Image (cartoon, rainbow, N blue to C red):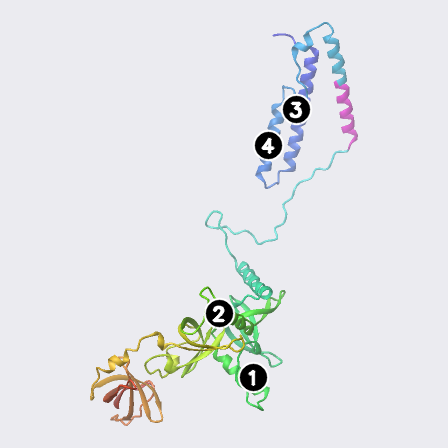
């Protein structure tokens, strides 16, 4: 094995010293990043240390590689090598002196930032997410703010009525758990006001109507919000007028409005009484009497319909050319066929039928037979002399058939079961 020259030994010593410094620098960097959560940065620092360790025993990349032949050719190669070595040693000494005079920079460690969000949730599915109640509330409030800015109609449930300290009556709407207040004057309750009626009496009449609407679906547009308290005030009137413009006064793809005469639409029931129901059809309210609800006698609409129900209706007429003057007429019975007349033809005088009393007015008993045929009785021959009442189950005897009126006429022979 050829003997190494002095220059080669010095170069190897310099390379080893440089590699040692790289190792120390990599170790220091590893300490600075020991709390770093990013594993990719940790791998990068480890690779840097491995590269520094691998340079031991060979010249670093930044130093030109020494070739043994360059120092063996010619008589003066040894002298030139010694001069180069002295220059290198002098340069190294100056660098070390500068490093000794410069105070070391303080070591810093990266600390984990405090999380401003809620603690993470351990999910069953890998990478899954859980929507908390706070997240849902934030989303609902965002929708309310969008309605305030863009005028987008929202739909909530009329949950209760409240009277404020100043006497103002408000409707409280539940929109996905968020409370929204609507003053009575913004509920678009249009009732005639007799001359001389006081404001208090008029407000009481409006409050009675609103009370029957509790449980109904209400469209509204948010008009004001309190972002800190998360309270909102809205207008049903604004939403209804907007819906009227869209569905009654704007032509669709067919060249006519979406709601027009002889169109079947879905309606919301907003109030129910004994003799009628109140519905809302895309921003327009109307009343349907019992006789237009069914082909048979319907004594009490509350037995068949309820507030908040959605039902199909037939719009028979649309009047008005502006959102403020629009009105409609609608019914339900035209959506079904009248089979009672065919069944009426099967009845003969002296036929005994089971029926239910739907109403009693001015001595006239209105009856709905078991097969749906309408009947009228003017007399009752109950053995216990009991007077017929609404909801009673009775035995009806046919005396004649009124084909023009589509009813059977007869008498009540006895009351089978009282409706108490």
Q: Is residue 192 above or below residue 266?
A: below
Q: CA distance from mark 1 to mark 3?
A: 92 Å
> Residue sitting at 68 percent across and 26 percent down?
21
At x 74%, y 15%, the residue is: 85
Q: Which residue is mark 1?
A: 203
Q: Is residue 292 visible?
A: yes
Q: Which segment is the magenta one? A: 88-102
Q: Residue 68: x and y, percent? A: 65, 11
Residue extending farthest to the top is 75
Q: Residue at x 46, y 49 (%)?
A: 125
Residue where numbered disc 3 is placed: 19
Look at the image and tell me in which quarter the N terminus lies. Answer: top right
Give how far across and how far down residue 115 sits, in percent.
61, 50
283 or 297, nearer to the observer: 283
Number of marks: 4
Residue carrying label 4: 46
């Amino acid at each position: 094995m050829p003997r190494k020259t002095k220059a080669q030994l010095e170069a190897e010593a310099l390379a080893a010293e440089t590699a040692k410094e790289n190792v120390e620098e990599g170790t220091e960097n590893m300490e600075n990043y020991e709390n770093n959560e990013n594993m990719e940065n940790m791998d990068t620092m480890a690779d840097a240390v491995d590269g520094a360790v691998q340079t031991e025993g060979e010249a670093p990349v930044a130093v030109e590689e020494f070739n043994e032949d360059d120092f063996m050719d010619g008589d003066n190669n040894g002298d030139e090598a010694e001069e180069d070595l002295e220059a290198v040693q002098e340069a190294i000494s100056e660098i070390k002196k500068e490093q000794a005079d410069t105070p070391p920079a303080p070591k810093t460690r990266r600390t984990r930032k405090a999380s401003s969000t809620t603690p993470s949730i351990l999910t069953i599915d890998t990478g899954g997410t859980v929507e908390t109640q706070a997240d849902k509330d934030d989303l609902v409030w965002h929708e309310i703010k969008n309605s305030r800015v863009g005028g987008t109609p929202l739909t909530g449930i009329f949950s209760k009525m409240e009277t404020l300290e100043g006497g103002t009556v408000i409707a409280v709407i539940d929109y996905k758990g968020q409370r929204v207040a609507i003053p009575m004057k913004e509920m678009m309750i249009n009732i005639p006001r007799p001359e001389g009626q006081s404001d208090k009496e008029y407000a009481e009449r409006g409050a009675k109507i609103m009370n029957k609407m509790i449980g109904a679906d209400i469209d509204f547009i948010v008009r004001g919000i309190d972002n800190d308290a998360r309270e909102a005030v809205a207008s049903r009137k604004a939403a209804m007028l907007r819906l009227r413009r869209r569905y009654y006064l704007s032509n669709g793809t067919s060249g006519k409005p979406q709601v027009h005469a002889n169109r079947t639409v879905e309606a919301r029931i907003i109030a129910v009484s004994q003799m009628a129901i109140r519905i809302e059809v895309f921003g327009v309210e109307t009343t349907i009497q019992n006789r237009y609800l069914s082909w048979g006698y319907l004594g009490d609409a509350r037995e068949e319909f309820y507030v908040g129900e959605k039902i199909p209706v037939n719009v028979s007429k649309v009047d008005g050319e502006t959102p403020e003057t629009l009105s409609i007429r609608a019914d339900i019975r035209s959506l079904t066929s009248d089979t009672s007349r065919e069944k009426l033809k099967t009845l003969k005088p002296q036929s005994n039928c089971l029926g239910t009393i739907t109403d009693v007015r001015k001595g006239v008993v209105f009856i709905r037979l078991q097969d749906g045929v309408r009947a009228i009785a003017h007399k009752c021959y109950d053995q216990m002399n009991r007077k017929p009442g609404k909801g009673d189950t009775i035995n009806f005897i046919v005396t004649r058939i009124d084909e023009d009126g589509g009813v059977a006429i007869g008498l009540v022979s006895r009351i089978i079961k009282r409706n108490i």
